Image (spheres, rainbow, N blue to C red):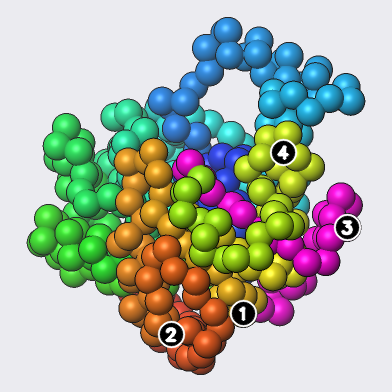
C-alpha cells in the first residue's frame, strides 16, 4: 500500500483546517492509500521561552473552574488535539525549518493541501520552502485543492515558490483565481479541485458529529467569524435572539471540538459566518446562512466564495441571506463533481 504524506497547515484552533484534513485522510483511505498527516508547524510560530511559560500557566489555569481566555484557549486546543489523535494518522511533530528530508523522501506521494498552504502572509522562508516542497525530488508531488488565499505570492518569496512548484507532478487549487495565477506564473497546467470536505457525503459527516454537553437549545442561530464580526450580519437574519457565538471566548461554545462544530451547523436554524467551510457545511446540511467578507484580514474571502457559488450554482451574494431554495442543485452537482474530481485525482496519483 502506497504511503501518502499530507502536507497541510497544522494547528489546533481552526475548524475548517481540521475538517479538511480529516476529509483528506478519508479520501486517501477510500482510494486504497495509507495517509499520514505531517505535523509540520510553521517555524515562524516557534515559541519563545516566555511564551512556553505562558502556555504552562494556561495548562494550570485550565484545570481550575474559570473561564479566563487563557484557560479557554487551552481547553479548546486540548479538544482539537484529541480529535487529531483519533482521526488524522499523525506523524511526530516538527517545525518546518527542521523538516527531515529523509523522512519526506520516504513517502511514495507527498500531497500538499488543502487549506491556505500557499498563503505566505504569516510565513518565513523555511515555511515557504516546506509548503512548496523546495528541493524535495524523490516522491511524487501533488497539490490537492491548495489555496493561496489572496491574489499572488509576495515578491520576496516568488522565486522559491516558482522553483518548488514547477517540480510538482500535478497542481490543483480551490479557487479559479489561483488556478489562473499559477498557470500563468509557472507556465504549466493547473487544475481546479473542489475542497476535500465536499468529497465526503452528509452521512460520512453525521457519523462523526457529536452533540456538545452544554447544548440545551433546539432553536438557535450559529455565529462563526474568524475576523471581526461584521456589523451588517445581524440584519441578515431577523430572528437572532438565540445566538450561539463559537468565537465568544467566555462561552462554553468556544471550546467546541471539530465534531461538535459539525453537529452545531447540522442542527442550527441559521448560520452567520465569514468562513468558507462553514458555508460548505451549511449547504451540505441544507441550512439557511449568510456569508460576509472577513474583516481585519489580509486574506480575501471573495475569490473562494465566488468559485464555490459559481461551481455549484448557488444563487446568492455575500452579505445576503441564502436559503436552500438558492442552491437546489447543490447536492446533485457535488455528486457529479465528486466523481469527476476523483478520476482526476486518481490520474494524478497513478501517472
Location of mark 2 (residue): 337
Q: Nearer the viewer, mark 2 or mark 4?
A: 4
Residue 203: in magenta span: yes
Looking at marks 3 and 1 on the same chain, the residue that comes earlier in the sequence is marked by 3
Location of mark 1 (residue): 286
Image position of 14 with respect to 209: above or below: above
The dominant secondary structure in magenta is: loop
Q: Give the image location of residue 207, x and y in percent.
A: 77, 71
Q: Give the image location of residue 313, x and y in percent.
A: 39, 84
Circle 4 sits in a helix, a strand or a loop, which is it?
Answer: helix
Looking at marks 4 and 1 on the same chain, the residue that comes earlier in the sequence is marked by 4
Image position of 312 with respect to 209: above or below: below
Q: CA distance from mark 2 to mark 4?
A: 34 Å
Circle 3 sits in a helix, a strand or a loop, which is it?
Answer: loop
Residue in view at x 74 percent, y 62 percent: 220
Q: CA distance from mark 4 to mark 3?
A: 20 Å
Amino acid at each position: 500500500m502506497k504511503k501518502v504524506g499530507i502536507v497541510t497547515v497544522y494547528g489546533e484552533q481552526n475548524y475548517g483546517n481540521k475538517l479538511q484534513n480529516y476529509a483528506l485522510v478519508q479520501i486517501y483511505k477510500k482510494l486504497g492509500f495509507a495517509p499520514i498527516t505531517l505535523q509540520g508547524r510553521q517555524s515562524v510560530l516557534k515559541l519563545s521561552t516566555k511564551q512556553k511559560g505562558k502556555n504552562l500557566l494556561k495548562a494550570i489555569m485550565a484545570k481550575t473552574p474559570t473561564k479566563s481566555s487563557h484557560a479557554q484557549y487551552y481547553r479548546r486546543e486540548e479538544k482539537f488535539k484529541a480529535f487529531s489523535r483519533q482521526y488524522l494518522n499523525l506523524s511526530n511533530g516538527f517545525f518546518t525549518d527542521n523538516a527531515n528530508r529523509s523522512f519526506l523522501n520516504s513517502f511514495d506521494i507527498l500531497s500538499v493541501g488543502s487549506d491556505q498552504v500557499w498563503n505566505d502572509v504569516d510565513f518565513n522562508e523555511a515555511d515557504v520552502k516546506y509548503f512548496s516542497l523546495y528541493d524535495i525530488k524523490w516522491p511524487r508531488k501533488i497539490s490537492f485543492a491548495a489555496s493561496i488565499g489572496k491574489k499572488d505570492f509576495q515578491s520576496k518569496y516568488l522565486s522559491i515558490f516558482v522553483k518548488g512548484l514547477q517540480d510538482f507532478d500535478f497542481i490543483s487549487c480551490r479557487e479559479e483565481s489561483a488556478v489562473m495565477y499559477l498557470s500563468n506564473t509557472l507556465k504549466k497546467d493547473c487544475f481546479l479541485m473542489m475542497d476535500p470536505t465536499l468529497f465526503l457525503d452528509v452521512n460520512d459527516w453525521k457519523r462523526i458529529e457529536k452533540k456538545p454537553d452544554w447544548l440545551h437549545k433546539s432553536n438557535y442561530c450559529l455565529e462563526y467569524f474568524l475576523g471581526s464580526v461584521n456589523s451588517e450580519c445581524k440584519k441578515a437574519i431577523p430572528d437572532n435572539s438565540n445566538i450561539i457565538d463559537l468565537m465568544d471566548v467566555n462561552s462554553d461554545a468556544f471550546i467546541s471540538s471539530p465534531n461538535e462544530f459539525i453537529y452545531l451547523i447540522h442542527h442550527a436554524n441559521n448560520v452567520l459566518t465569514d468562513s468558507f467551510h462553514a458555508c460548505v457545511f451549511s449547504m451540505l446540511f441544507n441550512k439557511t446562512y449568510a456569508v460576509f467578507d472577513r474583516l481585519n484580514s489580509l486574506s480575501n474571502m471573495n475569490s473562494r466564495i465566488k468559485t464555490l457559488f459559481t461551481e455549484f450554482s448557488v444563487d446568492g451574494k455575500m452579505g445576503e441571506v441564502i436559503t436552500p431554495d438558492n442552491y437546489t442543485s447543490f447536492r446533485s452537482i457535488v455528486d457529479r463533481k465528486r466523481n469527476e474530481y476523483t478520476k482526476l485525482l486518481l490520474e494524478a496519483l497513478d501517472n
